[in-house]
Amino acid sequence: MSGGDPFEGVFGQPQVRDFLRASVRNDRVTHAYLFTGPAGSNKTLAAYALAEALICASGGCGECDACRRVRRRKHPDVHYYAPEGATGYLVDQVRDIVSDTSLSPIQATRKVYIIDRVDLMNAASANAFLKTLEEPPDDVVLILLGRTRESVLPTIVSRCSVVPFRHIPATEAAGIIAQQAGVTPARARIGLAACDGSITRTIEFVKSNERMEFRKSVLGVMGRLGSMDSWACIEAARELVGLAKAPLDEIRAAQEAEIRESEDFLAKSAIRRIEERNKKALTAKNLESLNQVASIIASFLRDVLAVCAESPEVVVNVDVMTAIEEAAAATDEARIARAIASVRTCSAAISYNVSPETCFDALLFELKEALYGSRSPYQACI
């Protein structure tokens, strides 16, 4: 990403880049945007790029403290929200957002609110938001993110400037990642599989030896699954949760350092707001890491399915080909499809705040039964 252009890093979306860049340059920024597009289309990155351009006194110089804080997602006047309810946004959560918009900025001259998955905002929560969406305070810009225009309530769509994002094909995405991260296309494809198609998260993932080791450890669990007994499955579930939690200590330490840097010149109320934001960010990062575990498992299963279908050339995790072939020899396409469905169920349960260890425990037993049939640990418990 070039230092002076926050939009340069919005990969794969040239029309969006040009539109947002021109809006800032010509002072035509509106009070509310709705970014629509599939997962992995860089909507969140574009939202933060726009926030950087709006928060920075120079329109996104890339060098000042404000720009650096926004890029690190640490700026106290750039707020990110995701649904907290099992099925979407809670009315109380939306009311908290509305209440926060009335507060003065902490450091900048305006505030930016990035509100993800507004397609999961029902009529009740939307009604609590509509007045603010239509007429927010003068120092507030709202950036809403949704999967499709049609999935968002019309009352929300009509109050926003809609910015559509294109689907980025996997081969194009892998090429972008390989170029930006300085890795091979094969490593880029591995990262895409682990990060559910997100180019931004994948670039970070493939550049980190720790995250690549994390992936290898998850795949190691899958490689051992065929020889596990019931207790080994339970221990492996605990191992997976531990792998997901590993990056959180570093994030928590960085948050504490940020508080120490700010406490001398910020009011106690502002510190409390930063602490609350940090708590939510930590929760979101933990969920992201847990979802990466599920995505890596799903990528292994898709590779097993490819071998079962006699299409080994599309295998992504080629470095564990032996384990993939062994699993393929023990199962069939129908059972693999059932196993992949179990991973989706696991991910959904985790997002509903079910205990991650319970979710992975159940998942490993289900995968064991689907992949290895008569050697299932369920039968060992009878």
Image: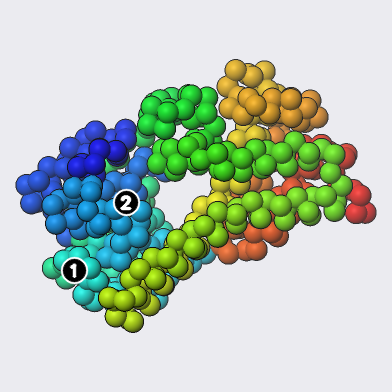
In the figure, 352 relative to 150: above or below?
Answer: below
**Residue placed under numbered mark 1 in the picture:** 136
Q: Please name the residue shown 24% across and 76% down the image.
A: 103
| Secondary structure under the numbered disc 1 in the rendered image | loop
Q: How many C-alpha atoms fall within 10 Å of the one at disc 1: few (<14), some, or many (≥20)?
A: some
Task: Answer whether residue 252 is visible to the viewer in this image.
Answer: yes
Q: Nearer the viewer, mark 2 or mark 1?
A: 2
Whether residue 113 is visible: no
Residue 129 falls left or right of residue 330 = left
Q: Is residue 149 left or right of residue 333?
A: left
Quarter containing the N terminus: top left
Which amino acid, mark 1? Pro
- For the point 78% across and 53% down, the residue is 235
Residue 225, position as x, y percentages in the image: 78, 40
* Towards the viewer: 149 or 13: 13
- 18 on left or right of 87: left
Q: Residue at x 73, y 42 (%)?
A: 221
- What is the quadrant of residue 286 in the picture? bottom right
In this figure, which residue is indicated by the disc labeled 2?
A: 71
Residue 100, image x and y in percent?
Answer: 29, 74
241, above or below 299, in the image = below
Per the image, label 2 sits on a secondary structure element best described as helix
Mark 2 neighbour class, 10 Å CA radius: few under 14, some 14 to 19, many 20 or more: some
Residue 284 placement (x, y as % from top left): 48, 59
Of the pair 15 and 134, the residue shown nearer to us: 15
Q: From this viewpoint, which residue is outermost toward the bottom?
A: 268
Kind of residue at disc 2: Arg
Q: Are marks 2 and 1 in contact (CB under 8 Å)?
A: no
Which label's residue is closer to the chain start, 2 or 1?
A: 2
